[in-house]
Amino acid sequence: MEKHRDDFFLATKTGERTYAAARDQIRRSLERLRVDHVDLIQLHNLTDPDEWEIAMAPGGALEAVIEAQEQGLARFVGVTGHGVIAPQMHLRGLERHAFDSVLLPYNFTMMQNPDYARDFEALIATCRERDVAVQTIKGITMAPWGEKDRTTSTWYEPLQDQADIDLAVSYVLARTGVYLNTASDVTLLPKILAAAERVTGAPDDATMQALVRRRSMAPLFV
């Protein structure tokens, strides 16, 4: 990375909840990446209400990421979250601090949960008003692994057929104002990039429901 720093938007995260631990972890990340700054530092998976209170309180991790930004170690600060509660907690976080970005799950099966869909839409509206970037994850989730042998490095079972990935990626990217983060398995990256190149519009619900039935898709978070 030290040789190609100018070619990438570089993001990292801290899962620590206190100021001192987060400050130290941010600096270790810079050392390991061999760079003097990142573009985005994120408070990772800040969804547990008790952990949220610690991170957002005086002496919490929020102070560390704000300090990193003020010192030029990060251009932007964001927050990430997993689970059905993620959009609720991101909305709460945006009331406490003007984060530059949020990150959370977005796919067809998650949006069939009416509570999640309602909260997601509320978050999207707030982010649009405040010019906050919305990163989405788990876009090509098929289902939890369950008892199956894992064949990819993703912690959920992903769609792997190119036509299926095309539909899942189109569902995400046809929505204005969101980003799609790729899956964590490098063998899936070419398929996701190929799908992104072919997006022309959103698949209709009937097409997505057919995909769900064909691949026995299930929500990763309930």
Image (spheres, rainbow, N blue to C red):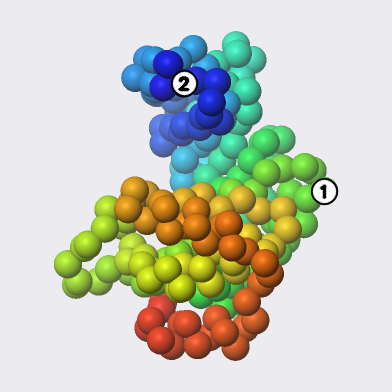
In the foreground, 206 or 64: 206
Judging from the image, what secondary structure is the residue with disc 1 in? helix
Q: Quadrant of residue 14?
A: top left
Query: How crowded is the residue under tag 1: few (<14 C-alpha within 10 Å), some, or many (20+)?
Result: few
The quadrant of the image that shows the C terminus is bottom left
Residues at discs 1 and 2 in contact (Cβ within 8 Å): no
Which residue lies at the image location 60% right of the left edge and 11% below the top edge? 71
Residue 190, above or below 220: above
Q: Can residue 168 be seen here?
A: yes
Please state which amino acid type lies under the numbered disc 1. Glu
Of the numbered discs in the image, which one, if any, rests on residue 129?
A: 1
Question: Mark 1 and mark 2: span between their CA atoms?
Answer: 34 Å
Which residue lies at the image location 71% right of the left edge and 35% below the top edge? 98
User: Mark 2 sits on what residue?
Assistant: 4
Q: Quadrant of residue 205?
A: bottom right
Q: Position of residue 133 (x, y in %)?
A: 67, 44
Q: Can residue 66 be seen here?
A: no
In the foreground, 172 or 63: 172
Q: Position of residue 187 (x, y in %)?
A: 32, 53
Query: How crowded is the residue under tag 2: few (<14 C-alpha within 10 Å), some, or many (20+)?
Result: few
Q: Is residue 114 left or right of 187 when viewed as pictured?
A: right
Mark 1 or 2: in front is: 2
